[in-house]
Image (tube, rainbow, N blue to C red):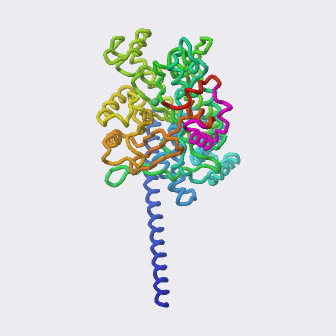
Amino acid sequence: MAQQYDDMEERRRRKKRREERRRRQRRQALIARGVVLVALLLILFMIIFVVGRLTKKGDSGSTQEAGTQNTTSEGTSTTVTDGNADATTSVGTETAGTTAQTFVSTAAANADLSTKEGVLDYARLQAAQYDYDGAIATIQSFSGYESDGDLTAEINTITTAKNACTPVEVSTTPHVFFHSLINDYRGLIASETCTEERVEKNNKAMTTVGEFDVMIQDMYNAGYVLISLDDLIVKTTNADGSVSISKNTNLYLPEGKKPLIMSEDDLSYYHSYGENGAQGYADRLVLDENGEVKCLFTDTDGQVKIGDYDMVPRIDTFIKEHPDFSYRGAKPTVALTGYNGVFGYRTNDYYKEGPEGADLNEAQKTFLRNHPEYNYDTDVAEATKIADAMKANGWTFASHTYGHRNATDATAEQLQADHERWKTAVGKCVGETNKIIFAFGADIGPVMGYTADNAKFTYFKEQGFDIFCNVDGNIGWTEFGSNYVRTGRVALDGVSMYNAITPGTPSHDTYSYDFDVLGIYDVASFFDSNRNPTYCLSES
Ligand SMILES: [Zn+2]
């Protein structure tokens, strides 16, 4: 008995020693990481300083520095728990860094950091979007802040808010998606400009601006906060140079706030959507006089207008009014095909062949006949400007395949040829992407996980894809592999809305549950009265 007790005692002591040793190692590793980070940041700082000097850059340069400072102070001086310190290191450099950084670049353009009021405004905006460290760094970048009661009080307020946050479980994040929004009845009722076939398609897969606005407001009221698809993961480079992907466990939000991912599919304003408002759609995205992304749209009176006539400007405006709907400036992801170009610009190089082009279909030829003024280079330049403005504002892009291909049915070779076309027609304007949102939700593998012998997966990985999205009524379905993440998306469209509010329909239980989870409780109250319910029964 005594012997047994001694053994236990000895084991206990050994375990304690082991734990102490591990703690020590962890501490040392943390310090080492901190030192490396500080050194890297110092170098970065010097580069920014030198470049700043050379180019005599003004405001944006100084904000950049503020952002850098923030990470430095976090890593070294601030007293935080181990978990939090990790959060700043990995999230700051790996994932959320992307969105935080891009957000800084846009918001900084409007921030006047030379005055105390400007500094306070900007810091409050950053804090409202859960970038507490960035907000504190902004204040600390203001010369003499230590002796200013308002500024030090604001730091205290922000610190209190930061400390009240808890880590969020991202593996159940709902991912909802929309198509281009319909602005009025013209897309829902058959007419000279809208065939019955289009009425059916619009009823099924589309959402009106009225429906969209209520749903966004409801999800916001329910505590949802937009995060980027990139916020789901942390990428780590291993010793052998390979890159591992794991779940981001360092996303912090206040009590009552929940993450939400959003995407918009097929933002091309296809020829099938009609022109000049024929079906209530915008014609294209444009930049307004302030450089903001808006839509060109023809209303029911034939008036041509520039404004919030689709999801991109509507979300931008909503977040301007409700900054806390966005985690560090994150915006939705736009999934793009290439065959009709992007954003209403005909950036597919096949259009260069002219109205008789061998690679063009009838709709494309008709477009070229009706638009002799069309110029490929101009369209590519315009679309690129819009993509740049969106990226600087937190939006990201995904491949939706070039030809709206069904990736389940297509062979690996076909998908490869398709993706080469995507790079020519879309990638040229929006740049590279690590996200693919499957057309028709048609995935390249079963839900048990992608395997190494999956030739389609291997090809997409080689092409830089990390994030794969299908369609799944099982809201929040997310799968983390060792080198990818996959999320299931729920469409908030005619079919899901009608099924949710109509007992006995094929997917009533699924969708009424999904809308409940999203905090959208009274779909019937905003379901567009111009809709034809028989078309909203099922997607097929
Ligand atoms: Zn699509």
Whether residue 103 is visible, yes or no, is no
User: Which is more toward the observer, 20 or 55?
Assistant: 20
Residue 141, image x and y in percent? 58, 44
Residue 130, image x and y in percent? 60, 45
Residue extending farthest to the front is 504
Residue extending farthest to the bottom is 2
User: Which is more toward the observer, 494 or 416?
Assistant: 494
Q: Measuring 39% from the left and 17% from the top, which residue is drawn there?
A: 376
Residue 243, image x and y in percent? 37, 49
Q: Measuring 61% from the left and 30% from the top, which residue is drawn there?
A: 212
- In the image, is residue 333 part of the stretch drawn in magenta? no
Compared to 469, does 83 lie above or below?
below
Whether residue 404 is visible, yes or no, is yes
Compared to 52, does 283 lie above or below?
above
Count the marks. Answer: 0
Q: Is residue 367 left or right of residue 329?
A: left
Compared to 450, does 374 lie above or below?
above
User: Which is more toward the observer, 178 or 149?
Assistant: 178
Tell me the magenta residue range. 504-528
User: Which is more toward the observer, 341 or 174?
Assistant: 174
Q: Measuring 52% from the left and 18% from the top, which residue is drawn there?
A: 196
Residue extending farthest to the left is 413
Residue 514, image x and y in percent? 58, 42
Residue extending farthest to the right is 149
- In the image, is residue 509 part of the stretch drawn in magenta? yes
* Quadrant in which residue 25 is drawn: bottom left
